[in-house]
Image: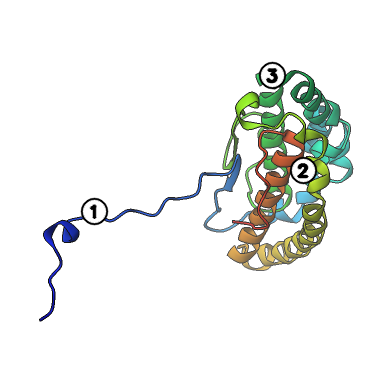
Amino acid sequence: MTSQPTPAASMAPAVPPVAPPPYAIRLSIDHQDGPRDRVTSFFRIFYVIPIAIVLAAISGGSWFSDSSDQWSIVLGGGTGVLFLAPLLLIVFRQKYPRWWFDFSLQLMRFEARVGSYLLLLRDEYPSTDEEQSVHLDADYPDVQRDLDRWAPLYKWLLAIPHYVVLAFLWIGVIIVTIVGWFAILFTGKQPRGIFDYTVGVMRWTYRVIAYAFLLNTDKYPPFEMA
């Protein structure tokens, strides 16, 4: 005789799977549907120069010297503001002034808009202050609760494997951007795979920046683009 499930067991609610918490920095870019602007795409390297000069003036000149590399905002002239000062305050006083964090976040947002324009992900000219279609958000940390005060001294070193992998991935971004440039000129569209790959590499890059330089999280970044 087959046993029947008890009423209590049959009425037990299913437990939904627990989603992992969102990472401390998040990037998304709206995909541009419809035909692309062939003219601005063809001259994109020249169109981006004025806004790149503005960004270079804010970030210390490093972005303009290597505009294909998302690391420039933290490895160039602006590093003293974006990295060194918060590092010293976290280590010695366990503080992270909100205005320093907000400045760093706004600068990264501006840089992401310029990078998205240069990499042909969007056609609208990047704004200096409006979010437009590039969405970059980061969590402000509770230093005493969420951060190890000594970790900023060595996190940049632990991220070396990411630097190596990202160096190759950014070479891939340059190659697919060139392919996408030709695709836009001849078909008026950028292949969705190129868009997804480029956004994925940017997203991975910003996670490493958040861990090693923005210093708003001690969670080691995953080796993934999602």
Judge left or right: residue 48 versus residue 143: right
Judge left or right: residue 80 versus residue 134: right
Give the image quarter of residue 62. Answer: top right
Q: What element carries label 1?
A: loop
Mark 1 highlights which residue? 13
- Looking at the picture, tell me which residue is in the foreground, 106 or 153: 153
User: Callout 3: few (<14), some (14-19), or many (20+) C-alpha neighbours within 10 Å?
Assistant: few
Looking at the picture, which amino acid does disc 2 mark? Val
Q: Is mark 2 on a helix, strand or loop?
A: loop
- Return the x and y of residue 170 as percentages of the image width and height: 78, 57
First in sequence, mark 2 or 1: give its number: 1
* Residue, far bottom: 1
Alpha carbon separation for disc pair 2 and 1:
56 Å
- Looking at the picture, tell me which residue is in the foreground, 223 or 113: 223
The answer to whether any part of residue 195 appears in the image is yes
Circles 3, 1 touching at the beta carbon (< 8 Å): no
Looking at the picture, which amino acid does disc 3 mark? Pro
From the viewer's perspective, is residue 172 above or below residue 100?
Answer: below
Alpha carbon separation for disc pair 3 and 1:
45 Å
Q: Residue 154 carries which label?
A: none
Q: Which residue is drawn at 59% across and 33% down?
A: 139
Q: Which of the image's four quarters has the N terminus?
A: bottom left
Circles 2, 1 touching at the beta carbon (< 8 Å): no
First in sequence, mark 3 or 2: give its number: 2
First in sequence, mark 3 or 1: give its number: 1
Q: Which residue is drawn at 53% across and 44% down?
A: 22
- Return the x and y of residue 74 as percentages of the image width and height: 81, 37
Q: Which mark is residue 97?
A: 3
Looking at the picture, which amino acid does disc 1 mark? Pro
User: Callout 1: few (<14), some (14-19), or many (20+) C-alpha neighbours within 10 Å?
Assistant: few
Mark 2 highlights which residue? 48
